Amino acid sequence: IRVLVDTFLAESFKEQGNAYYSKKDYSQAFNYYTKAIDACPKNASYYGNRAATLMMLCRFREALEDSQQAVRLDDCFMKGHLREGKCHLSLGNAMAANRCFQKVLELEPSNREAQQEKNNAATLLEYQRMADFGFEKRDFRKVVYCMDRALALASACHRFKILKAECLALLGRYPEAQSVASDILRMDSTNADALYVRGLCLYYEDCIDKAVQFFVQALKMAPDHEKARLACRNAKALKAKKEEGNQAFKNNNYEAAYQLYTEALAIDPNNIKTNAKLYCNRATAGAKLKKVDQAIEDCTSAIKLDDTYIKAYLRRAQCYMDTEQYEEAVRDYEKVYQTEKTSDHKQMLKKAQMELKKSKRKDYYKVLGVGKNATEDEIKKAYRKRALMHHPDRHSSATPEVQKEEEKKFKEVGEAFTVLSDPKKKVRYDNGHDLEDDGCFDGGGTFIFPLCSIGF
């Protein structure tokens, strides 16, 4: 009598569960199927029904357990094998899923659903294979592509989500990677892989201290997590070496700073943001050491890694100014000013534009062979020397071509002296102003000056 009562109750609970399932109230359906199982724990169909409900609630691991219990009770329970296979597939276990679908086809060879799901399992295996190959070749975009398609078949597979997130991080798509890892951590706060990816994103965004915290936490959850261990080691080494370099620079030990930044750059080529800063730091040290060409090269390397890095543009622009490469300096200052329209950046750009303008005129200091800080006496002496050197009378027996060239140089010497010997004209010239209207030249640009001033 007791067995009959339990069976009757179980069937009643099952019917109520079915009714709620039909209304898509899966939580209530789950409750009634559980009551049915409690009343009659040896009935395979009750486990099968609860498994179907759990699948609708996306609780695939629990659904898998119920499906496996159902087929343990009844190995010929086709729906149990089918649901077990679907759970395995959703969780990313394609091989196990394939075995379940094959079992269904043995029980019912014409089962179309099982055949389709078997094909899906084969497709999933192929995406896994392609992703593994892509990761080995560091083709992270290909891996993300494969994982997106794999997750369309295996929506509950944390392993696929983590692999996608890791590759997104390696591609520099940190917000997307963080989002995937955070979703997993909300469901499982102890997931070492997700903790590792969160740390990886922070590490690549140059938040090294926070990154180390996540790596350490991942290693607590999984002490043999090799990727977390390597990333933690790199993060600590990178931070230490960078800080050593900064301290050496502060101590004015530029050679040591340069070497330490070089060593830091060798630690992890994948850390783009930190390496961009290291290149810029090394450029600053290089500039102090008069390695201006190397400093420009380092700034360019920094910009290639991070084309939004304003400090690298400013450092390179200053190096260009120091080496009188004014067009390049203007280009960099324009980039900076477009990004950050500050008064300081505007002033830097104006100065570079003025120097560029000045560089395209005749360099009167070079014509006289003096420096830009030459005194009045030095300018006079240089003028006399150059005027004597190029005076037409000294080249009267030369070929017409040489005479013409020397006459041209002689006139340029006169032009230079007229401008640089006059304080007002010199200031205007130094400030980049045009001198055509200053009375230095006649209408055609021919310089007029008294020969007696040469001192023959």
Image: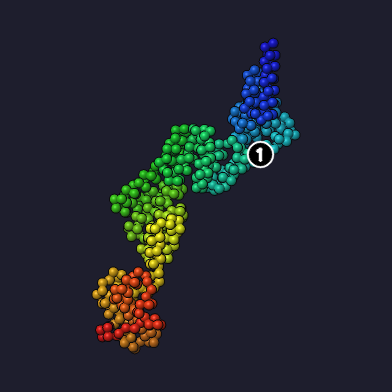
Q: Is residue 10 left or right of residue 208?
A: right
Residue drawn at x 34%, y 70% is 430
Q: Position of residue 54 (x, y in %)?
A: 62, 29
Q: Identity of the amino acid at label 1?
A: Asn
When the figure is inspected, residue 313 is found, relative to residue 418, above or below; the finding is above
**In which image quadrant can residue 377 be found?**
bottom left
Residue drawn at x 44%, y 35% is 217
Foreground pick, 384 / 27: 27
Label 1, residues with CA under 10 Å away: few <14, some 14-19, many ≥20 = many
Residue furthest left in the image? 377
**In which image quadrant can residue 366 be found?**
bottom left
Q: Which residue is mark 1?
A: 120
Residue drawn at x 59%, y 46% is 145
When the figure is inspected, residue 139 is found, relative to residue 31, above or below; the finding is below
Foreground pick, 415 / 300: 415
Q: Position of residue 141 (x, y in %)?
A: 55, 48
